[in-house]
Amino acid sequence: MAQIPFTFRELKRAWVQLHAASRKLPPGNAHRLLLFYAIECGLKAVWIKNENRTLYDCKDVKGNPIGGPSGHDLGVVVKSLNWGVKFSPAFHLSDVQDERRNVISRRNNRFDALHQAWRYGGELVSPPVDDAAMESELEIIHRLIEKELKS
């Protein structure tokens, strides 16, 4: 949730800089995490542009009566833009064991937790989608953002 208001210009600049930084890293979670945050900034920039606004702030979260984007759930933002594309609805991480060797399932994670998976070193398992496929989905969205923000 954006507790601090950010301008369209700041979000657009963050999108450009984060995407450029992600491309300088070798494929891996650090690269994907920067890509995720680039897409988040770009989507929110497109959203406020389409709303003829200049500021993204805390009223633009889930439950907002005007239907604004929320937190890290990029799928909500993409849906609100009516682009006709969707992210994979869920992702899986491999199961782990706790200290008593109990199996802990890490399946069916919501898209808004993707940044956590990559931030903490997780690897997506297919089906439904692996890291490379999810990265491809993000790059498709990047190209749509680019088209919107460069026009």
Image (tube, rainbow, N blue to C red):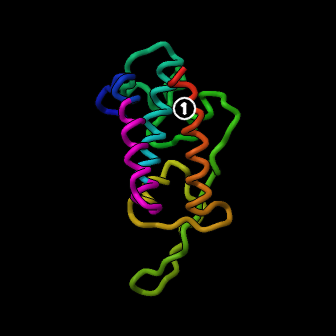
61 and 78: which one is in front?
78
Query: Viewed as shown, does residue 25 lie left or right of 92?
Result: left
Image location (x, y in percent) of residue 45: 45, 27
Q: Residue at x 66, y 31 (%)?
A: 83
Image location (x, y in percent) of residue 22: 41, 50
Image location (x, y in percent) of residue 82: 66, 28
Which image quarter is the N terminus in? Answer: top left
Q: Residue at x 47, y 33 (%)?
A: 42
Mainly helix, strand or loop, the magenta region? helix
Residue furthest out toward the top? 52
Q: Amino acid at mark 1?
A: Ile
**Where are the magenta residues, as a range?**
13-32
Q: Which residue is mark 1?
A: 145
Q: Residue at x 51, y 25 (%)?
A: 149
67 and 25: which one is in front?
25
* Callout 1: SS: helix
**As drawn, 144 above or below 29:** above
Q: Residue at x 51, y 75 (%)?
A: 104
